[in-house]
Image (spheres, rainbow, N blue to C red):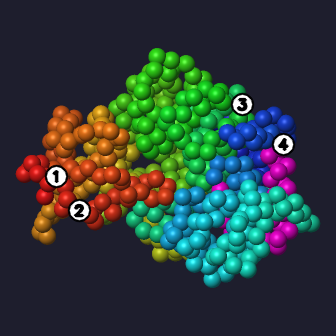
Amino acid sequence: MSRERAFALLGDKSAWTLPAIVRRQAQRYGERPFLSFASGAALSFAGFDRECDTLARALAATGLARGDRVLAMLRNRAELLLLAIACGRIGAIFVPVNTEMKGYSLQHQLHNCAPALVFVEADLTGAFAAVAAPAKLPTAVVVVDAAPAEEIAAFAGVRHWRYGEFAALQGGQALADPSPQEIACIMYTSGTTGPAKGVLMPHAHLALFAVPSAGLELGEDDVYYVAMPLFHANALFIQVFGSLLCGARVHCVERFSPNRWLAEVRACGATVTNLLGAMSEMVFKTPELPDDKDNPLRAILAVPVADWVGRFCERFGVHVCQGFGMTECNMIAYATKDDPCLPGCAGTVRGDLFDVAIVDPETDEPVAEGEVGEIVVRPKIANAFMHGYFGMPEKTVEAWRNLWFHTGDAGRREGSLLYFVDRIKDRIRRRGENVSAFEVEQAINALAGVGESAVIGVRVGDAAAEQEVMACVVRADGAALTERQVLDHCLARVPRFAVPRFIQFVAELPKTVSGKVQKQALRERGAAAAWDRESGATK
């Protein structure tokens, strides 16, 4: 299916809402299979629509008002998807949170969104044990799977329901699809540099997210394999609801495993899937087998890729395309079939929907074409973008300075093509040269015996104006890798100015609950305990 055809399926802009799209597709496809899960649960297009209505009436029966928030701490299961649509049908706001959340991170998001209802899986209720109760308690807690052994302390005195009992509630409130400009969802950023920010996402924003990449050519005969968490925009909007828009089928597993990936793809007959971050490299590093190409996949949306991408395509017999987007600003670039599949090349800017510029991150002045700067973006149509950060007006203003949304990512433009280079804060200035941490990490990760790595800039001495390059390396299980081996590998593969001066083996990299490396924590540790190639010894 062409991008133009997928875009046409959105219909008139007054109907750019996922609840409206679900209803239209239920009428179009009826009992045709839509969703299946590794657990065995399955729903047709019409069945999904009916279950959304049932849950929406139960939500209405609790007295939920328009604009009330509904927090969901759920894994990859049908209830999360039903809740995303059911909330919209009564004007409530869906707030999915990471199932790894606990302690301060969970407390911050709970207090920030102040939900009227909380949905949580039975075995995840313990995450609230060390969380202080919000100023305003929810009216009810709905526990999926089974009733908790005891009341959640943070919600003392609040009615606790089993999911089945709750879904059986049926109020008399009429259901109505929301308007495109109403807030549909609050989705929290990863919080790598501070408290997570709640992105206010209008309904039109979510509907536009579902328009698939032209390079995927998603159609009715496709099966989308979803191994990423549904509480993130990529899996929820691009994969599941992108499939809904195009009439494709979806199969969800609970979590990604590089060792199970190909077997699961084969088992569900997947033709399309997405890989994000280190996932594609993890798949590529699995032992190569003679029959790897014997699979039904035809296309993968993978971000980012490195110089191994050609071998990846050949090994698995697939077409790989890339893109660039953020929860805040939608997908602003997608690769077409004619765009080169090169490391960093996100594809063609969606110029009909977004203005995209590259500016000096210090001055916000445009840089020349081909030069690296910060990627900034703004929408050309209303409600295709976030409305701000919930309860954080100062962060909204900061991100939108000079009337452009600042992504915090370094990139460059070459005509209509957008290239991602690195996170702005991850770029390192050494001896007059800009060092891409991402590129050095890719080189190190290609070394046998490396599990993963993170490259940062550190300053040595109080008066140091520039940075030195430091690599934090996690050995693969059983590997007996030395600092000298890492150094020699880098000397042969990266520019001299980018070769790490400091190398430190660590048991693990500090990460956010969404799996992103917290490089600020590594910078704060510094190079005090690292091996220094200038002295050949640990400092």
- Cα separation between marks 4 and 3: 16 Å
- Identify which amino acid the numbered label 1 is placed on: Trp
Q: Marks 3 and 2: which is nearer the front? A: 2
Q: Can you name the residue that lies furthest to the front here?
A: 149
> In the image, what residue occupies the spot 63% across and 76% down?
154
- Cα separation between marks 2 and 4: 56 Å
- Cα separation between marks 3 and 1: 55 Å
Q: Is residue 510 above or below residue 491?
A: below
For residue 512, what is the image quadrant? Answer: bottom left
Q: Which residue is mark 1?
A: 531
Sort mark 3 into few (<14), some (14-19) or many (20+) by Cα contacts within 10 Å: few
Comes first in the chain, label 3 or label 1: 3
Say which mark, if any, is on residue 526: 2
Q: Nearer the viewer, residue 337 or 414?
A: 337
Q: Can you name the residue that lies furthest to the right here?
A: 172
- Identify which amino acid the numbered label 4 is placed on: Ala
